[in-house]
Amino acid sequence: METLLNIRPWYYLDESTRNILISIGIKLGIFLLFIFVALLVGKSVPRFLKGIVRRFSPQPFQKIYENLVDPLSKTLGIVATLILVSVCLNFIQEYTGFYRFLKFFSDLSIAVSLAIFISGLFRNFLRVYGIELIRKLGLEIDELLLVFETIANIIIGFIVAVAFAQSQNVNLIGLVAGLGIGGIAVAFASQKTLEQIFGTIVIYLDRPYVPGEYIRVHLSSQGLLFARVEAIGLRSTKLRTPAKSTLVVVPNSIMADADIENVTRGKKVMVLLYLDFLRSLEKSEQALLEKVIKESTNSLFGIDPNSTKISLFSRENYPGVRARVSFFILGSNENSLEFRKRLLELANDSILKKLQSHGIEFTMQEPTLYLESPVPI
């Protein structure tokens, strides 16, 4: 009761205490106001940069900006917003504990978003300019390009992680080196256990299968096994055989080294191209058309060999003929399919140039149709 009586209302506080509270309130108000402004300005940065590029930069640079940066406008807005919020934190720098707490998470958010943005820039550069450059060098394009993209992402993530650790006064390289020396001693003591753990890590990172998918795997004890993935544990993978409905438990270290065919993920995409010709084609021109299209498509990595079919039919109420070209693109995941679609765009340009060089004019209908179709078990 006595404690409650000692609590004084606002107007009973001495002048110095009131001034301190007023100062704190004003600073927090300004801080929140600047945070609100940072959120608004950060979202506008991509549009502002795009406007400057269109107004003051030459046409080639505008094209580069549209291909590389414009698809990442949302990520760029997030990076800009987080940087502005980090700058606003300086208004509360005198409140050391609160400032350091918010500053840590602010810097971490900036590092993560910046890594995602740089990774996206590299991916767009690889898809737009890298493929064309490799083709000009006469080298074969295959999924090694996707592997290179993954390695580049790992390098970008490592560099950003080191930079963030240095900004927080943490010697990340020294810490990793120290853990490596200690890890050697642990490795000798628990080699088998570490094999299982590393096998599990490989499976979770590479994701050759997930629970619920059907796979074919060659095991030394079982031979060729067709089964459904029941579960992936820390030590082993549980496989359910469809015939006997028995459960086969395989150590993850063995599964990581085994040859695995993922039946569930097997899929192909039917591609339909429509080419409209303003006049009828002679027999020789039809043969040339078939030759050019097959050479341009079958040479692409990931195109189902000998799946290209070309059909010619007349157009209703329009002069000339229409050619329908169909073939299948094979892929194991969405990323590789998008990669092959980009290659197909380059093939379309090749078809256009080759036919025009022989005096055959046509228009290609947009958009090209992609129809997904599962590969039968």
Image: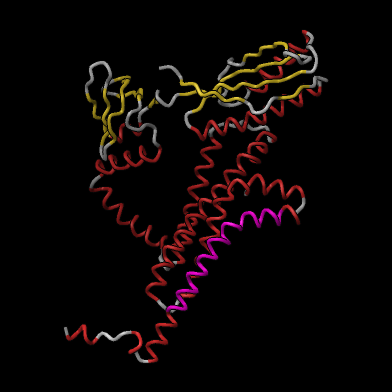
Magenta span dominant secondary structure = helix
373 and 197: which one is in front? 373
**Residue plotted at (39% across, 91% down):** 16
Give x and y (percent) for residue 352: 74, 25
**Residue plotted at (26% across, 37% down):** 233
Give the extent of the magenta segment.
Answer: 25-53
- State whether residue 72 is above or below residue 19: above
Give x and y (percent) for residue 282: 79, 9
197 and 294: which one is in front? 294
Q: Residue furthest top?
A: 283
Q: Residue furthest right?
A: 359
Give x and y (percent) for residue 36: 51, 65
Colour pattern: secondary structure
**Residue plotted at (48% across, 72% down):** 31
Give x and y (percent) for residue 101: 39, 68
**Residue plotted at (47% across, 29% down):** 332
